Image (tube, grey):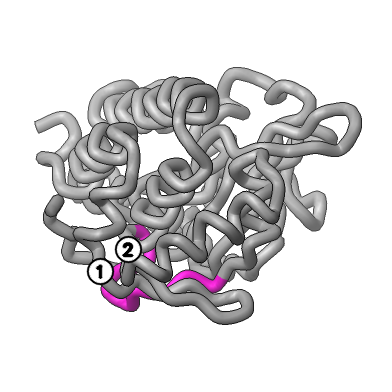
Amino acid sequence: MLPPLEWKPRSCLLDRLPPAICTRLAPDLQPVDLPVGKVLLDAGNGHGEGGNGHHVYFIRSGIVSVLYLTANGDSGEIASVGNEGMVGMMLLAGSPRVGTRAVVQAPGEAFALRMDVFEREFNRGGAFQAMVLAHTRWLLAQLAQAAICNRHHSIEKQLCRWLLLGFDRQGGCGELRITHEALANLLGVRREGVTEAAGRLQEAGAISYSRGCIRLQQRKALEQRACECFALLHHDYRQLCMGPPFGG
């Protein structure tokens, strides 16, 4: 069984920056709540709710899904972010592709940093730039695994992968408040398929669920039913959470 991480409600990325950079950024890091459904990034207008300009969000707790929306309204998750990462840095390269949206799936907290401050620090190079590049590699790894997983692996295996990463991001509580319908939308499959897969996982003793809530019962059983994508992503996830200081 892969070892669970010691979870803490702080930004793993900010924790790995040198103290001098954290001190410089501190006045501009604004704590924000992340209620379920809050939109942090929408390619339709370039920013999240409220029209308050461009921000990068360093996630401290909760789960944010990066979705791609089709013209007919269908959607699927192309990446997800917890306290190992950040949301909104794609604005550094200009407006994101139409159809991209970042939405809070599990409630939590974040630090919001204005894009102009983020860009200024990025242009300094050094540890902050190394942090951004490390997170970019993490997002690309998720994109690559999603492309393979969605094409070649069963709904049950995909569900196990998503739940395991979700439980990691929620820390030791072992509980995810999310519906089968929401999971189906994230995985890009029918709700009935998720319900059937969740039923088999419950029968195997891996999870239990009631309306809108999934609880972890046996992590080893869930890992055994997950595809190899989870082990690969879990390795990269641990590197972001527990790696050495950036620029060290």
Residue at image coords 57%, 38%: 88
What's the amino acid at mark 1? Answer: Gln
Q: Which residue is mark 1?
A: 218
* Residue range (magenta): 169-177
Name the residue nearer the viewer: 12 or 1. Answer: 1
Task: Give, as a three-letter code, the residue at label 2.
Answer: Arg
Is label 1 or label 2 in front? 1
Q: Quadrant of the C terminus?
A: top left
Q: Residue furthest right?
A: 72
Image coordinates for residue 38, horizontal then vertical, percent: 70, 60
**Contact between labelled residues 2 and 1, with CB atoms less than 8 Å apart:** no
Could you tell me which residue is drawn at 61 percent across and 75 percent down?
212
Q: Is residue 214 left or right of residue 10?
A: right
Question: Residue at the spot x=36%, y=59% of the render?
Answer: 169
Secondary structure under badge 2? loop
Numbered mark located on residue 10 in the image: 2
Horizontal side, residue 55 vs residue 142: left or right: right
- How far apart, in angstroms, are the residues tagged by discs 1 and 2? 26 Å
Residue 102, given in percent of the width and then of the height, sits at: 64, 44
* Residue lying furthest bottom: 210
Residue 60 in view, yes or no: no
